[in-house]
Image (cartoon, rainbow, N blue to C red):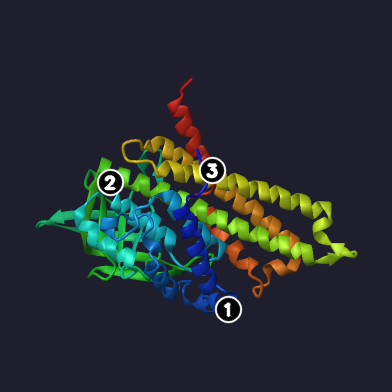
Amino acid sequence: MDFSYDETQEQIRDLANRILADYCTQDQLRKIDDKGYYDNTLWQQLAASGLLGIALNEVNGGMGLDMESLCLLFEAAGKHAAPIPLIPVLAGAALPLQSLDDPSLTDHLNKIAEGSQIITHAPAVLKGSTLDAPKLKADYADGSWTVSGRIDNVPAAKNANFCWAMAQAGEDLIALLFSLEADGVTVESQVITTGEYTARISLDRAPARLLARNEKALSLQRIATCLTLTAQAAMATGLCDEMLSLASSYTSERQQFGQPIARFQAVSHRLVDAWIDSACLRAVTEQAACRLSAGKDTLDMDIVEQSAQVAKIWTADALHRISHTTQHVHGGTGVDRDYPLFRYALRARQLEIELGGASRHLQALGDALAHRNPQ
């Protein structure tokens, strides 16, 4: 596999980093801290630049590029601790909905690309090739669907217009899209580790639209999970790079016993180990993104899932180790909220635990390999 960037990808990376650097200064981030960690001005700027539509087809208002290209935006967002819901909106909602090839969704996808609409996704737990019991129940009557139940910790729901989720309809497993502004829908704020607002969504016979049923619905959830895990790994790569950059600068300047502490073996060896973790995370992330970028005719979901799980395992482990190492070498400065490292440490912790930690995915990967290659 060739993971080098082409000219278009280099331009995307440079543009994303320039915009995010302008909007994610420490002073600006402090102003967002008490507002649910969401900067609508930055979101609109990314939309105006075309970056929200990197991986959407041209008919859907995008550039028609692939997941490898989109991961450059996720990585840049991690590097700058950007307070925007890129992962749930693009990886969790836009790309999975696009995969349905449903022309009636074109208007929704165009509005995502132009920044005038946000669609989020209520994550569901996959166990192997099946879905854990959905928390929503759906009913069909008089030619229309309604959905009831409650789901917690839905990302970006406080700022979103629509949400899609899995539900049970009798013996059928279905995927539904519903408006968060419709009758029968209540959205309550919840706060996660980073200070970001998620939401508890309560539904009481709320109107909904059928997206997919049974195997097609399960496939939709599988691709959404793989895209989300890979996006998290890409964002984690940016986080790790910046945490190591901060640690490198600090230990090169901090003097102890007449010399920079970076010269002490105890410090330098820990940072080298952290750099190795970061390099391994980048490699498995690029592998997962490359496999997700394959055309539909060559996309092997079993291989894609395993690559995404490997990326998630490294995401959880590398973030944990690198966060601890960079905090350690900073001493008390690392937890000072006037110093930027705390933002990266909080985001690292959140990404580490989202959609399950390394142990759960390692178990799932082992089960999949054992099933594929029985003794």
- Alpha carbon of mark 2 to alpha carbon of mark 3: how far? 27 Å
Disc 2: which residue: 217
Q: Which tag, 2 or 3, sits closer to the chain's start?
A: 2
Q: Amino acid at mark 1?
A: Asp
- Which x, y percent locates residue 305? 43, 40
Furthest residue toward right = 257
Disc 3: which residue: 284
- Categorize mark 1 by other alpha carbons within 10 Å: few (<14), some (14-19), many (20+): few
Camera-near label (1 vs 2) is 1
Q: Eyeballing the image, is 347 above or below 174?
A: below
Q: In the image, is 216 to the left or to the right of 372?
A: left
Asked which quadrant contains residue 122, the reply is bottom left
Q: Nearer the viewer, residue 311 or 124?
A: 311
Q: Nearer the viewer, residue 139 or 243?
A: 243
Q: Nearer the viewer, residue 7 or 264?
A: 7
Mark number, residue 27: 1
Tell me if label 3 and label 1 are in contact, CB under 8 Å.
no
Q: Amino acid at mark 3?
A: Val
- Which x, y percent locates residue 364? 47, 38
- Alpha carbon of mark 3 to alpha carbon of mark 1: how far? 34 Å
Helix, strand or loop at label 2? It is helix
- Which x, y percent locates residue 279? 62, 47
Asked which quadrant contains residue 198, the reply is bottom left
- Alpha carbon of mark 1 to alpha carbon of mark 2: how far? 44 Å
Q: Which tag, 3 or 1, sits closer to the chain's start?
A: 1
Q: Amino acid at mark 2?
A: Ala
- Categorize mark 2 by other alpha carbons within 10 Å: few (<14), some (14-19), many (20+): many
- Categorize mark 3 by other alpha carbons within 10 Å: few (<14), some (14-19), many (20+): many
- Which x, y percent locates residue 120? 35, 61
